[in-house]
Image (cartoon, rainbow, N blue to C red):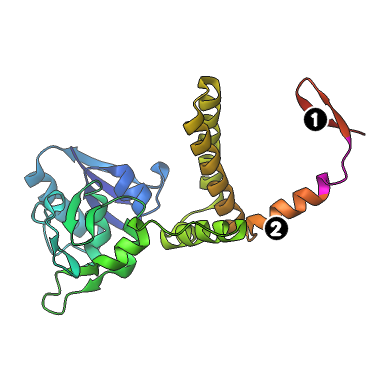
Amino acid sequence: MYYLYHIPGKKIGVTRNLNNRVTLMQGYKENEYEVLEQSDDIEYISDREIELQKSYGYKVDMKLYKNLKFNKMKINATEQTSTFPCPKNKLKGQLMDNIGLKWETSHGNFTITSDNIPWIVANAKTSMFNDNRCYIYNKALYEAYFNIKHTPSSTSERFDLIRDWAATRGLYDEGDSHTQYVKLQEEAGELAKALLQDDKPEIVDAIGDMVVVLTNLAHLQGYDIEYCIDEAYKVIATRTGKMINGTFVKDK
């Protein structure tokens, strides 16, 4: 199904996935846009998009939606680079429509994911031979996302790596504290499930994920997670109390 959506005052567009294209990619919630029409006829929806763009006075796309071939993207990989069949200003949309697509390079098989799309877009360069193509360097993508880093030598370095990971993926530029809090609750639910099932690997995974989320949440609020931990420890360091029913109850 193709959806013809309208972001009031901004644009009219077409997508097959409203959540990916409008919410995740462009940042508009469901109550901030409307679906004008929907159809499984790509010919009709392509012509209708242009018609409505003109009617509403928005910028009119140079190509019909049906000619963009979002879901038939062929990535040309050489030893050094991977080239995408679209101009840089259309790259993010095409990548969002091709999440899960894999391609082979000299550095191994790469996959388009919601995590690495911001990096690809930020590091893509317009081809010097064709303005309608752009490319990235394979080794750079490999180092950013697929190379297993060395084991951190200290707790502080571990947190630095988490922050570097998040920054590289655009989490600090495009994310927010509220989203991270929701993510934290999701991970807490995963931990609860793992505890009930006594699933040790999942317990480890869930706790680790919660630490990552808390690190990013602290950063988005302007703090290092190390500072938050130190401040908490200062409060509990001299605290006295006793264990009651498996819980430490502080003295009043």
Residue 235, x across and y down, in percent = 82, 47
Per the image, label 2 sits on a secondary structure element best described as helix
Q: Residue at x 13, y 54 (%)?
A: 73
Mark 2 and mark 1 lie on one chain; the one further toward the N terminus is 2
Q: Residue at x 51, y 59 (%)?
A: 161
Pointers 2 and 1 in contact (CB under 8 A)?
Answer: no
Locate residue 121 relative to residue 109 in the image: left or right: right
Residue on which the image places disc 2: 227
Which quarter of the figure is the C terminus placed in? top right
Residue 247, x across and y down, in percent = 77, 26
Q: Amino acid at mark 2?
A: Tyr
Residue on which the image places disc 1: 248
Locate residue 25 relative to residue 38 in the image: left or right: right
Q: Is residue 48 visible?
A: yes
Does the segment drawn in magenta span residue 74? no
Q: Amino acid at mark 1?
A: Phe
Task: Name the quadrant containing residue 133.
Answer: bottom left
Does the segment drawn in magenta span residue 237? yes
Which quarter of the figure is the N terminus placed in? top left
Prevailing secondary structure class for the magenta stretch in the rendered image:
loop
- Disc assigned to residue 76: none
Residue 234, x across and y down, in percent = 81, 51
Say if 93 sits above or below 33 in the image: below
Q: Which residues are magenta?
A: 235-240
Residue 143, x across and y down, in percent = 34, 63
Say if 65 sits above or below 167 in the image: above
Q: Is residue 120 visible?
A: no
